[in-house]
Image (cartoon, helix red, strand yellow):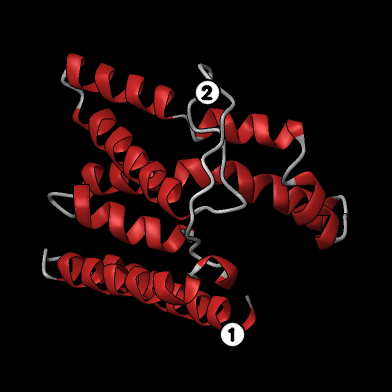
Amino acid sequence: MNTPSHLLIGAAAFARPARGAILWAAMLGSLLPDLSLFVMVGVSLFILRIPPQVVFDELYFSPAWQTVFAIDNSFILWGVALAFGLWRGWRFLTVTASAGLLHLAMDFAVHADDGRPQFWPLSDWVFHSPVSYWNSAHHALLVVPVSVAICVGSYVVLWNRGLSVAAKLFFTSLLVVELWVARQWLLFF
């Protein structure tokens, strides 16, 4: 799924209350599994000036990049973080890890040809879902409307939790970005 959708859904699921440290924890957990991708793609495209085709068709699937993705998308590592947070009674870590695990579960379900080895370090196996959040060859035309509906529902939940004006603007921006990206998936992929 797209990162804005993860942020909306993770915050709606775990940011109670939807302010302060708990909101930041939900956002952090929702973002971290995708952060390495943004950094590596950004450096490759804008600093190293590697063509997009090489970045997305070769580097993304390279052993080096897949190793990084295996680490930050590991159900095992995120599960250990959740267990540790629960054991220590650290709410920030518990919410962060919960949002991270939700992110991984959603990605597990909708990555057809671009999944990640989510059981590292125990296994390098990659689940290839029959459905994709972006690829119409794998039913994205059915998945995108469901994803958008969940994002809109998450937005409504967050809005009704008494967000600050700044947070309302932030989540509105995320929803607009998600709707624009969903439109792109439907039109071009």
For residue 158, above or below residue 32: below
Q: Position of residue 62 (x, y in %)?
A: 77, 38
Query: Residue at coordinates 42% horizontally, 73% vertically from top-left?
Result: 144
Disc marking residue 13:
none
> What residue type is disc 2 on?
Trp
Q: Position of residue 186 (x, y in %)?
A: 53, 81
Numbered disc 1: secondary structure: helix
Disc marking residue 120:
2
Asked which quadrant contains residue 86, the reply is: top left
* Image quadrant occupied by the C terminus: bottom right
Query: Residue at coordinates 38% horizontally, 50% vertically from top-left?
Result: 106
**145 or 11, which lies in front?**
145
Left or right, 117 with reference to 65: left
Disc marking residue 187:
1
**118 or 98, which lies in front?**
118
Residue 69 in view in this figure: yes
Q: Position of residue 81 (x, y in %)?
A: 34, 22
Q: Residues within 10 Å of mark 1 (few under 14, many from 20)?
A: few
Numbered disc 2: secondary structure: loop
> What residue type is disc 1 on?
Leu
Query: Residue at coordinates 79% horizontally, 45% vertically from top-left?
Result: 59
Asked which quadrant contains residue 153, the reply is: bottom left
Left or right, 168 with reference to 142: left
Query: Residue at coordinates 37% horizontally, 77% vertically from top-left?
Result: 145
Left or right, 177 with reference to 95: right
Mark toward the start of the polypeptide (2 vs 1): 2
* Distance of label 2 from label 1 (alpha carbons): 35 Å
Asked which quadrant contains residue 56, the reply is: bottom right
Residue 19 in view in this figure: no
Q: Position of residue 117 (x, y in %)?
A: 56, 33
